[in-house]
Image (spheres, grey):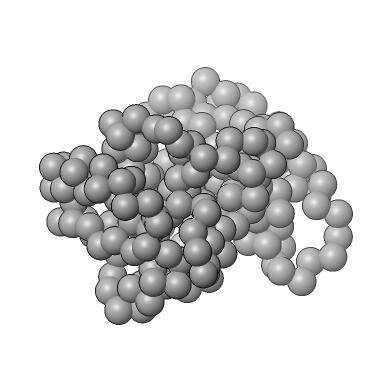
Amino acid sequence: MKHLLIADDDAHVRALLRRVLTREGYRLTEARDGEEAASMLRQQRFDLAVLDVMMPRMDGLALCEHIRELYDLPIIMLTAKDQLSDKEQAFLRGTDDYVTKPFEPEELLFRIKALFRRYSRASSDRIQLGQVVIDRQNYEVTAAGETLLLPMKEFELLAQLAQYPGRLFAREELIRLIWGADYEGDERTVDVHIKRLRQRFAGYADEFAIQTVRGIGYKAEVKSR
């Protein structure tokens, strides 16, 4: 049984999620603010977290960042803020998905199931995007049976995006994950590497593509399996 952490200071929202998610067979633990959620994370193992952005003591953005530093689990941000800048901040902190209030409970349920599928694929050392296979253990990429030699940063960038298809990564997050937190160069280096990857795999555009989300960053989209 999947164990979900729900962190929201609104009792009505928690009750709604409790009703919908327990009906689907999920086990829930509820927190009323970010600090209570952080404490629960230290005591129990969770498979996914749903976080409200605006909470007392520790807000959802800070909690998201805290989770990313210490744990490996999918995160959905749940918030009334729907401006592009608000979404950018959430993705910069490491969220996997972003749902705005008011929301349809069934939509949230669909997104939770999609994240579990995505993370299940990510647990393997081999990632497949159509005819392109990424071997993270041996740092090899094969396309239609042919081995391709990629520079290390291109390989790591491709693997990071492919590991979580559909997840949007902000440029700043990709810089931190691939080049390191102490990188002092231009963040547009991400754009350069993305361009090279697109050129290398142009022949497989019908199977997967690296999509640009203007003003934020990139995500891998799988078109066929």
For the C terminus, the quadrant is: top left
Residue 28, image x and y in percent? 22, 57
Foreground pick, 198 / 139 = 198
Instruction: Please give the name of the residue rendered at 57% of the width and 40% of the height, measured from the top-left corner.
Output: 81
Q: How many marks?
A: 0
Residue 187 appears in the rendering: yes
Q: Is residue 39 above or below residue 53?
A: below
Q: Is residue 108 left or right of residue 144?
A: left
Residue 31's quadrant in the figure? bottom left
Residue 218's quadrant in the figure? top right
Residue 164 appears in the rendering: no
Residue 210, image x and y in percent? 61, 34
Q: Is residue 200 left or right of residue 59?
A: right
Foreground pick, 34 / 219 = 34
Residue 199, image x and y in percent? 71, 32
Instruction: Please give the name of the residue rendered at 55% of the width and 26% of the height, measured from the top-left corner.
Output: 204
Foreground pick, 86 / 171 = 86
Foreground pick, 211 / 2 = 2
Q: Is residue 142 above or below residue 209?
A: below
Residue 5, image x and y in percent? 32, 60
Instruction: Please give the name of the residue rendered at 39% of the width and 32% of the height, measured from the top-left corner.
Output: 103
Instruction: Please give the name of the residue rendered at 65% of the width and 50% of the height, measured from the top-left corner.
Output: 89
For the N terminus, the quadrant is: bottom left
